[in-house]
Image (spheres, grey):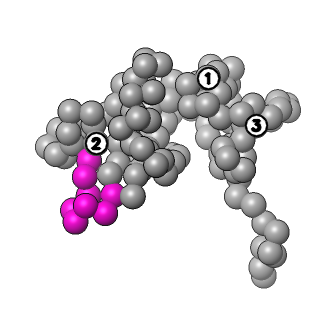
Amino acid sequence: MSLGADFKVINFIQSRDRPAAVAFYRDVLGLTFVMDDPFASVLDQNGTRLRITQIDGFAPNSYPALGWQVSDLQASIRALTAHGVTMKIYEGFGQDEMGIWHAPGGTAQVAWFEDPDGNLLSLTQV
């Protein structure tokens, strides 16, 4: 079986409070709101859809649920912190004062933060 040449990726994220999640992904992260349906709210992430589904009693995982590659990690962090987002600092991980972890060999820089439901999100600059 093949997906065919015209397939597109759709990301899903779960929330206890869909309106609050939509506001965060739209107003803080800058994703474009597309539509609501009875099952999810849909936002556009530069051509890839993000479906936010509400699940009562949802509990987030400790590993990243979504991540984005950015061209200027420090500028992205400054924009997020200006909107009240706190970057995650992990004890003993060796992140800098902005919360940036530098991969061995200098190939990537990564920073983490959470959405209102506690979903772990990441930004990467390569």
Q: Which of the two labelled residues, at mark 3 and mark 1, occupies the earlier sequence position?
A: 1
Residue 105's spot in the image, x, y percent? 22, 66
Q: Which residues lie in the magenta part? A: 101-108
Q: Which residue is mark 1?
A: 27
The crowding category of the residue bearing disc 3, from other C-alpha atoms within 10 Å (few below 14, some 14 to 19, many at least 20), is many
Nearer the observer: mark 3 or 1; the answer is: 1
Q: Is residue 96 above or below residue 30?
A: below
Query: Pointer 3 and pointer 2: residues touching (CB < 8 Å)?
Result: no
Instruction: Check disc 3 and report its element: helix, strand or loop.
Output: strand
Q: Amino acid at mark 1?
A: Asp
Q: Specify whether 56 is left or right of 116.
A: right
Instruction: Check disc 1 and report its element: helix, strand or loop.
Output: helix
Q: Which residue is mark 3?
A: 42
Find residue 99 and report its image quarter.
top left
Q: Amino acid at mark 3?
A: Val
State the separation of the CA atoms marked 3 and 1: 14 Å
Q: Is residue 110 above or below residue 104?
A: above
The verdict on residue 93 being magenta is: no
Q: Specify whether 98 is left or right of 123.
A: left
Nearer the observer: mark 3 or 2; the answer is: 2
Quadrant of the image containing the C terminus? bottom left
Residue 64's spot in the image, x, y percent? 45, 46
Q: Which of the two labelled residues, at mark 3 and mark 2, occupies the earlier sequence position?
A: 3
State the separation of the CA atoms marked 3 and 2: 29 Å
**In the image as oriented, which residue stretches furthest toward the bottom?**
1
Instruction: Check disc 2 and report its element: helix, strand or loop.
Output: loop
Q: Which residue is mark 2?
A: 100
Res. 118 visible in picture: no
Q: Is residue 111 above or below residue 26?
A: below
Q: Amino acid at mark 2?
A: Ile
Q: Specify whether 70 is left or right of 33.
A: left
The verdict on residue 103 being magenta is: yes
